[in-house]
Amino acid sequence: MTTFEQLQDARRILEGVAHHTPVTTSRTLDDIVGCQVFLKCENLQRIGAFKFRGAYNSVSHLDPQTRARGVVTHSSGNHGQAISKVGQLMGIPTTIVMPTTAPVTKRAAAEGYGATIVEHDPKVEKREEVSARLVEEHGLKLIPPFNHDHVIAGQGSAAAELHEDVHDLDVLIVPCGGGGLLSGSALATRNLRPGCQVIGIEPELGDDATRSFRTGTIQRVENPQTIADGTRTESVGDITFAMIQEYVDDMQTVTEQSIIDAVKYLFLRLKLVVEPSGALGIAALMSGAIKAEGKRVGVILSGGNVDSATMTRILAEGRD
Ligand SMILES: *Cc1c(COP(=O)(O)O)cnc(C)c1O
């Protein structure tokens, strides 16, 4: 499992590179959900999501020869953007394996940071096989999106900042896909504010981590069709699962409608652009999946990368 020393080390590495993102509050929101909410705005992080933290920390730990050969990942989402951006900042080559079906905007964003895109046809081979081949043939270093100590330590730095900026939180609510953010946040919380409850949130349609948490063995979900695309992972990893079991107090799920409502609320009322995965915590509070009457509640808004078509749909389908 990732250690608190690794997390503190990540904080030193990220100092002055990652944004120390702001925490915002809203009386209106507090009145609606019946508790005092502190929103950690990782939607305002570099590349628009917390994934910059884990990516930068991981690449920083590579030796110069490895770095010079370059890094590869097979995530076309925020982790891919983060790796591309880190490559640009450090002047090292990056390769992102993307399906032929990936949206042009995602391709363009990664290419804009100087990444090389390797296309693969999901019908012909798995993305893991493509990146494994690049590792084998070109000596590239694979940076996984969540199941890695340096990634988890980096992601945990956001919650560490939150606990330092806002004292005495009773509850911390964190979105969960592969569990890197949740593991790191829980590790930070156990060390900085041991009494604070840590709750992971997943979309109902991709509830594998919640089932894993309840059953004690890693459960899977096949190609979940949730709007919260940052959490569409098939399962947690062995490291993140061990940390979730050790440090997380509870896991809850939220419906697609509640995610849509939360994104719309954050946009229209709080003037915050938050992507569906980033709004899971607010969805949990507003839908009543988590009740925290009278408590001080930290919520990680994990990212803000939502395209205009999705936001248009959310504004049309969300409740006012
Ligand atoms: C990746 C991501 C998540 C899930 O993080 P994990 O570490 O995979 O659990 C949540 N929200 C956003 C915006 C993400 O990009």
Image (spheres, rainbow, N blue to C red):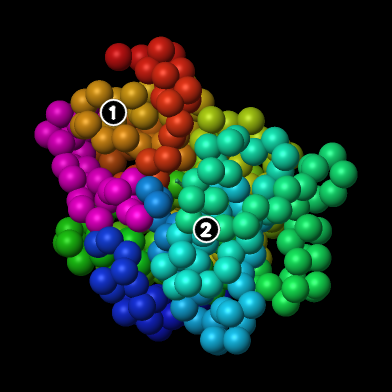
**Picture disc at residue 139:** none
Above or below — where is 153 with respect to 36?
below
> What amino acid is found at the position of numbered circle 2 in the picture?
Gly
Q: Is residue 40 magenta?
A: yes
Above or below — where is 299 with respect to 27?
below
**Picture disc at residue 267:** 1
- Left or right of 123 in this view: 86: left
Q: For the residue labelled by badge 1, is the local secondary structure a helix, a strand or a loop?
A: helix
- Left or right of 118 in this view: 87: left
Camera sees residue 226: yes
Q: How busy is the neighbourhood of tag 2: few (under 14 within 10 Å), some, or many (20 plus)?
A: some
Q: How busy is the neighbourhood of tag 1: few (under 14 within 10 Å), some, or many (20 plus)?
A: some
| Residues in magenta, as a range | 21-46
Closer to the camera in the image, 12 or 177: 12
Residue tagged 2: 114
Above or below — where is 316 with respect to 16?
above
Q: Is residue 262 magenta?
A: no
> What amino acid is found at the position of numbered circle 1 in the picture?
Phe
C-alpha distance separating marks 1 and 2: 31 Å
Q: Which residue is drawn at the image coordinates 72% and 40% (left, top)?
A: 100
Camera sees residue 298: no
Could you tell me which quadrant the N terminus lies in? Answer: bottom right
Q: Which residue is drawn at the image coordinates 47% and 23% (left, top)?
A: 309
The location of residue 60, given as percent across then percent down, is 47, 78
The location of residue 97, given as percent across then percent down, is 68, 54
Q: Which residue is drawn at the image coordinates 58% and 68% (left, top)?
A: 93
Which of pointers 1 and 2 lies earlier in the amino acid sequence?
A: 2
Closer to the camera in the image, 111 or 46: 111
Question: Is the distance from the Cβ of mark 2 to the nearest ligand 1 atom less than 8 Å?
Answer: no
- Please tell me how many numbered marks the rendered image carries: 2
Quadrant of the rendered image containing residue 266:
top left
Above or below — where is 92 with respect to 299?
below
